[in-house]
Amino acid sequence: MSETIADIEPPRVLIVEPDVLVRHPLAEYLRECGYRVAEAQTAVEAEQLLQANELPIDIVLAEGDTGFHVLAYIRKHELDVQVILAGSVTRATEKAGDLCDDGPAITKPYEHKFVLDRIRQMMAARDRRRN
């Protein structure tokens, strides 16, 4: 089996978070870990990035109601994108229900290493499903 560019390129992550003081440090950490990262402040910006397809996204990390809006958009358009929902423990579990196919939501404030581990787990699970 030959490798494709998608097999050797690092995963592409979209962080959707309104607070730049939360979003930017996490984005920088993931970039330092070798990921290609796009940032959006709102669900509308996230949708524009997903539509543009200039940087196809593998995983979206989105918080709160914004996350649910982005997840609905991804499902409606049948995009092959994993989603990590983030927010407070109570709100995330109450609202997520069965939306989180790949596991529970994560909580804020983001523990950067935990987010990185979650991304790695999701990408490994995706690769196993594809093979």
Image: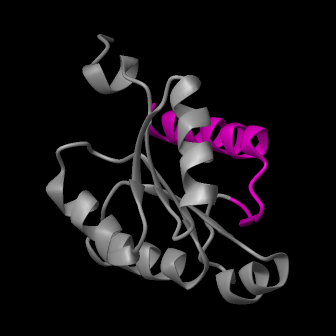
130 inside magenta stretch: yes
| Above or below for 7 versus 20 | above
Q: Identify which residue is drawn at 78% across, 61% down.
A: 109
| Helix, strand or loop: magenta stretch | helix
Q: Is 128 left or right of 5, judged from the image as shown?
A: right
Q: Identify which residue is drawn at 78% across, 77% down.
A: 88
Q: Residue furthest right?
A: 90
Viewer-proximal residue, 102 or 64?
64
Magenta residue span: 103-131
Where's the N terminus, which quadrant? top left
Q: Identify which residue is drawn at 45% across, 73% down.
A: 71
| Above or below for 97 versus 120 | below
Where's the C terminus, which quadrant? top left
Provide residue 91's location: percent of width, then percent of height: 75, 86
Viewer-proximal residue, 58 or 98?
58
Q: How is the image coloured?
A: one colour
Q: Residue furthest top?
A: 2
Viewer-proximal residue, 31 or 121?
31
The image quadrant that residue 78 belongs to is bottom left
Viewer-proximal residue, 119 or 65?
65
| Above or below for 6 versus 73 | above
Provide residue 92's location: percent of width, then percent of height: 73, 79
Q: Is 110 left or right of 36, judged from the image as shown?
A: right
Q: Identify which residue is drawn at 69% across, 46% down.
A: 115
68 inside magenta stretch: no
Provide residue 21's location: percent of width, then percent of height: 61, 57
The image quadrant that residue 93 belongs to is bottom right
